[in-house]
Image (cartoon, rainbow, N blue to C red):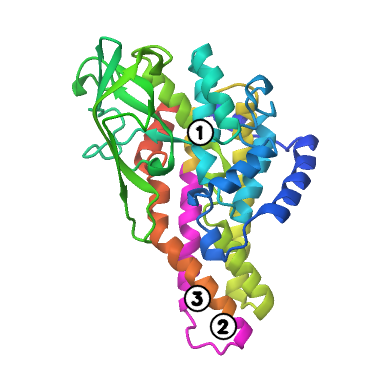
Amino acid sequence: MNNLLDAFRLTPLPAEAESFRAQVKQFLGEHLPDAPANVRARSWMGFDAGFSRRLAARGWVGLTLPTEYGGAGFDAFRRFVLVEELLAAGAPVAAHWIADRQSGPLILRYGSAAQKDFYLPRICNASAFFCIGMSEPDAGSDLASVRTRAQRCEGGWRLSGRKIWTTNAQHCQYMIALVRSSGGVEDRQKGLSQFIVDLSLPGVSIQPIVDLAGDTHFSEVTFDDVLLADTALIGEEGAGWQQVTAELAFERSGPERIYSSVVLLDCWRAHLARHGASASELGLLGGFITQLATLRNLSIAVTARLARGESPVVEAALVKDLGTEFEQAIPALLEAAIASDPTAVLTQEAMSSAAELRRTVAYLSQISPTFSLRGGTREVLRGVIARGLGLR
């Protein structure tokens, strides 16, 4: 417990990270597409390849990757600032998001020299977008129940199986897939490996899935006897579970696990500032801001661990669990607050801003249940935390 408390000691952002914030704000002022709040609320689910390439041209995709691969060579603190500002503004970052956040760092850590030379520059110039092949049909949140299989054959590997809830697979060039390379489902974490799959290969089919909000950012991907070269294997055969666990620390540690509803919160705050707020509304707003400040400090503490080259698996799981509760509470409580006085008389201007506010809260009310599913369910995360504390 003391080690966990030490990990979350208040950590200020370095001065160079805060000075970097001004550059990001200026960039967003010049390049952020004009969009209403209900569109900006999609942010890291909003796919805009053009915006990602403009960001890459500035040197800010692959921000933490080494300069020899086209990255900026910046630390995790400046990436925190960049991500925080992008999400707060509601920038459409989905195109490069997975590659920047976890595929690039994973390849840097475990990939061969040839994989680094080929993929990392393409990630940094936003010409290669990646998706994640973890979840499978009928497996729920049990990541170890992997049935998709890669079998050795002449010339490499034959891949067969299915992945589901694969974000933006229909727009991506590559997937990093966790598959079974030996043994059976009963072997659980043993016998798993990670492969880079070129999604244009024969035998790969992608079926988009329409969600409740009418978006199609999820897909089901089927592999029908897909031939992979030996060079598609990342790291060591059979080491997939250890590698994917480290990858999930990248996925769970960022500000996106806190800021998914922040555009809605900012829209509501602006509406109250223009048209007045009751005492109960001010109290609710103050509660949200207090929680956000606390969670932000926890996330920065995890970022400090990443900056030191550590793998804060337990700490990232804790922040993700707390953060998604906060993200889900915002639309739920604001929906109740807005509905509490549906007959309020508004000016024409107020009616216009209220309409945008209602569209935004409606979208997040529909999509927010996914916040505690993506990146590991609440139950899975609490199991990780319990093991880290020695409680199971």
Mark 3 crowdedness (10 Å alpha carbons): few <14, some 14-19, many ≥20: some
Residue stretch in magenta: 321-350
- Towards the viewer: 279 or 254: 254
Secondary structure of the residue carrying numbered label 3 = helix
Q: Which is nearer the N-term, disc 1 or disc 2?
A: 1
- The answer to whether marks 1 and 2 mark residues whose Cβ atoms lie closer than 8 Å is no
Q: Give me the C-alpha separation between circle 1 and circle 2.
A: 43 Å
Dot 3 amino acid type: Ile
Q: Mark 2 — residue?
A: 351
Mark 1 crowdedness (10 Å alpha carbons): few <14, some 14-19, many ≥20: some
Dot 2 amino acid type: Met
- Left or right? Give the position of 63 relative to 207: right
Q: Which is nearer the N-term, disc 3 or disc 1?
A: 1
Which disc is residue 128 wearing? Answer: 1
Mark 2 crowdedness (10 Å alpha carbons): few <14, some 14-19, many ≥20: few
Q: Mark 3 — residue?
A: 338
- Left or right? Give the position of 341 relative to 197: right
Q: Position of residue 73 (x, y in %)?
A: 69, 26
In the image, residue 337 lies in the stretch drawn in magenta: yes
- Towards the viewer: 377 or 243: 243
Q: Which is nearer the N-term, disc 2 or disc 3?
A: 3
- The answer to whether marks 2 and 3 mark residues whose Cβ atoms lie closer than 8 Å is no
- Towards the viewer: 376 or 55: 55
Q: Residue at x 62, y 73 (%)?
A: 271
Secondary structure of the residue carrying numbered label 1 = loop
Which one is in front in this view, the residue at disc 2 or the one at disc 3? 2
